[in-house]
Image: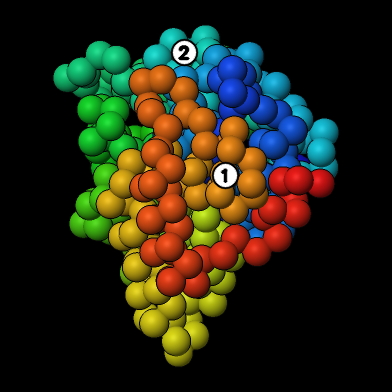
Amino acid sequence: MASADDLKGLFTPVLTPFTKNLDTDTDSFVAFCKWLVSQGSGLAPFGTTSEANSLSVEEKLELLDRLIDAGIPANRIIPGNGACAFPDAVRMSVAAARHGCAATLMLPPFYYKGVSDDGLFRAYAEVIERVGSSDFRVCLYHIPQVSNVGLSVALIERLVARYPDTVVGLKDSSGDWDNTKAVIDAVPGFKVFPGAETFLLRGMRAGAAGCISATANINPAKIAELAANWRDDDADARQAELDSVRAAVVDYAPIPAMKAIIALATGKQELKHVRPPLMDMGDDAAIALRGVLSGLGIDLPGLADAMNA
């Protein structure tokens, strides 16, 4: 059985492979997840980087089942369960609890804007109460620049006070270090994950649990290594290396860019596909980015063999 103690280190918000017809490519998804785990990362599928809001509930449930069937430890999986409709969030949450996942990564309902903390508390509480399982844990997901619905420190404190064994963590993708630090300070023992490796070392030194970062899809081993060995003398130098890789990727649209890099690395061009409204990265831009990343030491060891087995 998973516990809150499993929430530590690196979790990668996994890219979702699609076929040329834009169906989910379950075999490639499982193979890619196995490779990420082999690089020292846990998995956080069905978040922003996974194009989760372009996936149906049925697709996400099938992919989660396939990960478990493939033998990936459930205590290293934090599937996203965020949805505007709380019955959809409940369905994902029940599946995660049944499988014994470490937690679920839960966006607030994000369609209505200007909602109160009382309304957001009610939304989270409704899901938690309906799941009704001691095996269910929530890692809140704060990404206000995308969702336009933020999670205040006061709301987080209130949820933890009401559900201390269920609401156990936060992914803070706001990019605001002051907010991340405020949550770490306000809720001792809470599992706070900066949403970018940019804040990994600073976060670990302040009491964070690790990070959940999109660019771990192409740089998992080095991020996982720093998360595990952040007290080492060369930690600042390693952090600087991670920052250089992230800066190279965010110069582009990160999701199509990382998919294009993986397609080039594996020779499987269908892996570059994204669902609308996103657009595939052009070949010239992908080749240019691959050259930059190669110069930074990014070579995705073993990925081609894993994806072509």
Q: Is residue 52 above or below residue 191?
A: above
Residue 119: % across, % down: 29, 17
Residue 124, which numbered label? none
Snapshot quadrant of residue 156: top left
Q: Residues within 10 Å of mark 2 (few under 14, many from 20)?
A: some
Residue at numbered disc 2? 86
Residue 209: % across, % down: 48, 59
In the displayed structure image, the side of residue 151 where residue 22 appears, left or right? right
Snapshot quadrant of residue 295: bottom left
177 or 17, nearer to the observer = 17
Residue at numbered disc 1? 263
Residue 230: % across, % down: 48, 76
Q: Residues within 10 Å of mark 1 (few under 14, many from 20)?
A: some
- Element on which disc 1 rests: helix
Q: Is residue 73 above or below residue 297?
A: above
Q: Is residue 105 above or below residue 294?
A: above
| Rendered-image quadrant of the N terminus | top right
Point 41% across, 68% down: residue: 242
232 or 183, nearer to the observer = 232
Point 67% across, 36% down: residue: 29
- Element on which disc 2 rests: helix
- Which kind of residue does numbered mark 1 sit on? Ala
216 or 303, nearer to the observer = 303
55 or 120, nearer to the observer = 55
Point 76% across, 46% down: residue: 308
Point 38% across, 56% down: residue: 288
Residue 79 seen from this side? no
Snapshot quadrant of residue 132: top right
Residue 139: % across, % down: 48, 40
- Which kind of residue does numbered mark 2 sit on? Phe
Whichever of labels 1 and 2 marks the residue nearer the N terminus, that label is: 2
